[in-house]
Image: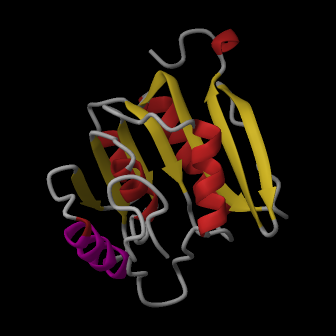
Amino acid sequence: MRVISGTRRGLKLKAPQGLDTRPTEDRVKESVYNILGQNFHGAVVLDLFCGSGANGIEFISRGAEKAYFVDKSREAIDALKFNISKAKFEDEAVIIEDYMNKAIRNFDIKFDYIYMDPPFDRMDLYKKAFKSIAENKILKPDGRLIIEYKSENNLLMYPGFIEIKNKKYGNTSIAIWGWDENEGNICG
């Protein structure tokens, strides 16, 4: 696992111990950033269920101003801290060891990008995250929600969002959602 592009291109990252965390494949990561574009300068990012932090670190490497990393796993947080230090991104990173819904409720900012990658077998966490993101309005009006999920799972649209893109990479699929402007002022 490595940083694909930007100021830390090629930097190898440490994965958390155990089987609870599944790193995003390089080809999937590269494709996501090709879809999103290359200009992330000044962006504020949330890496939800961050694991090693590879996705948030990738955003920072590509110019994001700040990335918030949320995970409840001690092993993930330990690997994340190691990777943030190795990348020398301490000033650009905010690490939150907590449950997703509690962390989201405590945010008083809106994000340009939210990358969420819960454990593939926990579809309940996907639904809880969508609900919490929508209710707490933490995604900017023109922001993007990037969702990594198991291709065989049925990812249902959550009210208030529209799908912008969906792409399959073998066992992994990526959906990119934005706010549905026809749903009214859901994004506040």
Tell me the residue at 62%/49% (across/down). 32
Majority secondary structure of magenta residues: helix
Q: Residue furthest bottom?
A: 18
Task: Count how many numbered circles sit on residues in the image.
Answer: 0
- Foreground residue, 175 or 40? 40
Determine whether, in the image, residue 87 is placed left or right of residue 55.
Answer: left
Tell me the residue at 39%/52% (across/down). 6
Tell me the residue at 54%/10% (across/down). 185
- As drawn, 111 above or below 80: above
Tell me the residue at 46%/72% (across/down). 2
- Image quadrant of residue 80? bottom left
* Residue 146 in the image, given as x and y percentages of width and height: 59, 45
- Image quadrant of residue 171? bottom right
* Residues shaded magenta: 74-86
- Image quadrant of residue 183? top right
- As drawn, 9 above or below 11: above
* Residue 48 in the image, given as x and y percentages of width and height: 45, 54
Determine whether, in the image, residue 60 is placed left or right of residue 137.
Answer: left
Residue 156 visible? The answer is: no
The colour scheme used to paint the residues is: secondary structure
Residue 60 visible? The answer is: yes
Determine whether, in the image, residue 158 is placed left or right of residue 39.
Answer: right
Whether 153 is among the magenta residues is no
* Residue 44 in the image, given as x and y percentages of width and height: 34, 37
Whether 85 is among the magenta residues is yes
Looking at the rendered image, the quarter that the C terminus falls into is: top left
* Residue 129 in the image, given as x and y percentages of width and height: 53, 48
